[in-house]
Amino acid sequence: MCGIFGIITEQEQTLGPILIDSGRRLAYRGYDSVGCATLTADGTVDLRKGVGRIEEVSAKLDFAAMRGLRGITQLRWATFGAPSYANAQPHLDSDGDLVGAHNGNVVNNVQLRELFIREGLTVRGTNDGETCVHAVERHFDRNGGDMLAAIRAAYVDLEGDYAFVVTHRDDHRLYAIKKGSGLVVGLGERQAYVSSDLPSLLPLTRRIVRIYDGEMVVLSPGVVEIYSVHDGARIERDEEWYDGPIEVAEKGGYPHFMLKEIHEQPTVARELLHLLHSSPHVDRFLDALTATGDRPVYLVGCGTSYHACLLGAYLFNQLGGQPAVPVLGPQFIEQYGHSVGPQDTAVFVSQSGETKDVLNAVKVMRERKGRVLGVLNVLGSTLMHHSNVYLPLACGYEISVPATKTFVNQAVLFLYLAYRLAGRNMAKLDGLPDLLAHTIETVDGPARQVAAYLDRWDDMYYLGYGLTHPIALEGALKLKEITYAHCEGIFSSEFKHGPLSAVQDGYPVVFITAPGDEAMMINHINEVTTRGGRAIALAAEHEALRANVHDYLIVPDADRFLSPILATLPAQLVAYHMSVTRGIDPDFPRNLSKTLTVD
Ligand code: F6R
């Protein structure tokens, strides 16, 4: 999982600022290392790269000054090869004639590297992006210096899913190939661009050419040619004019994007509800949901989006009367891939719309002729293109790696659909944005205090019962993701079946409780407190509950089905404050990436 960007222009110029800006827009895809390469008219290659985030590396190596006719930027999220200078991309071939960078995974990387070393190529690192460059190098001479022929031959050697951009110092064109990972082309007046995603191109151009798997592109200034990698035939494709919004990512006075995005939740929830009330797609979406008859609808996602699926399944089953099964992307393939068919519907939920684990499941569903419904935030994403019907989350850009506002809107969307399935009056739901705003205002202080207590521990639990179980998982994920403490979310009744042995004096356990579940939760709380554990309630005010816990994070009193969404906010704020207390940047936690386009 990485991001690649390439540009070719007619006039030699300072390309540095464009490469940096594009890199910043792709930084959500990886921030282990970053590199830029430019090539001047006489074929001189300037390659600068280093470990760390683009802000630091570009300042240190003065990317801004880089000049040329062609340029490549790469943002790396490490899979093959530790983050290091040698593994940072772009890479050179043995004698420095070829420069290239990739996104994705070459699964036979180790075998190919060994082969290249045996054949005498200069292999500098262990990264599979370098393997892509050498794979082209190896076939370049054998094919009489024909880049397209060399790339086609390399494609046969390189197993896995990836996208790859490469250029030769004496060939004034940029080449790229797509096999499983994202790749989009943009056209300018006397320039052409290629990138891992559409949003990174939009500040440069709105003239877009979509590229599909198994296609190679050749970019010259203002021109793109597309070829099939299989038979080398030319493919004609019209450019599209993209007239969607260009999102501007600013912190708006907040110290971190995460805090800003938490505070945006009442607004984006309101906008989503407004959109759902007026969108013609909702009826089509509901028709496809109910078309399965007695068969369950599958709700498929990963990470935070999977937690939304868990909540969605509860709401569909309990409130909407629609059987639904929540399932992880890869688990969908393993468990149901052989049995789903044209009679089935699956809702694929993904903020980015590019998560490989989800797209693999989409592919299986399409092959089996089932209905593919998408719930996504990034318009123009692969999931959007592969959905029979999709609903947008309408959150705008989510920059911070931990998902916050997109989770809340996934939950709001599922609740809205469940209300529609149940024929419920929407008035209560329309009050949700105000309740979210009230929650943020009142809970921030108490969340800081709880975070200060949790900060003393490196191990803890979030417990939820039924409706709040998905929120316990989500609260725990947020906390471990940005504080590096271990935190597990489980169904509260399961605690006594093993994890209870972790409890000792002061051991923190957070109990997320929906209205109506307090009596059950009080039992589970006492199993912890009698053993010296510290119980922290996250619930609407409730006298008996209060009498049984040490700390209380209060959410507004609301309808039972709204309460899990409200409970999400304090959990996000606790994780945020604890992260900041620990001196961690919650927007860019170590080892992670906003979009995971690898298996
Ligand atoms: C955690 C988080 C991840 C994502 C997961 C799926 O805060 O953001 O767990 O939810 O990687 O991503 P999407 O929703 O883009 O498919």
Image (cartoon, rainbow, N blue to C red):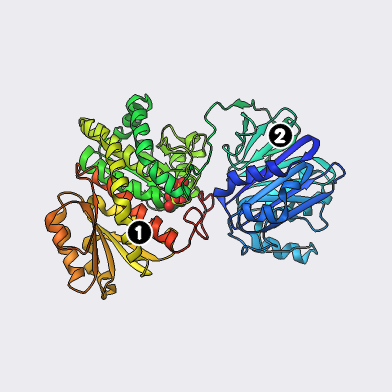
Q: Residues within 10 Å of mark 1 (few under 14, many from 20)?
A: many
User: 502 above or below 469?
Assistant: below
Residue displayed at 69% across by 60% down: 112
Quarter occupied by residue 187: top right
Q: Position of residue 387 (x, y in %)?
A: 45, 35
3D distance between C-alphas at marks 2 and 1: 44 Å
User: 133 above or below 366?
Assistant: below
User: 39 above or below 278?
Assistant: below
Q: Is residue 336 visible?
A: no
Judged left or right of residue 197, residue 392 is left
Relative depth, front residue between 560 and 506: 506
Relative depth, front residue between 228 and 510: 510
Quarter occupied by residue 21: top right
Question: Which numbered circle lies on residue 192?
Answer: 2
Relative depth, front residue between 258 and 528: 258
Q: Amino acid at mark 2?
A: Ala
Query: Looking at the image, is mark 2 or mark 1 nearer the viewer?
Result: 1
Judged left or right of residue 559, residue 280 is right
Q: Residues within 10 Å of mark 2 (few under 14, many from 20)?
A: many
Residue displayed at 27% across by 54% down: 469
Q: Position of residue 256 (x, y in %)?
A: 47, 50
Tag 1 residue: 476
Between disc 2 and disc 1, whose residue precedes? 2
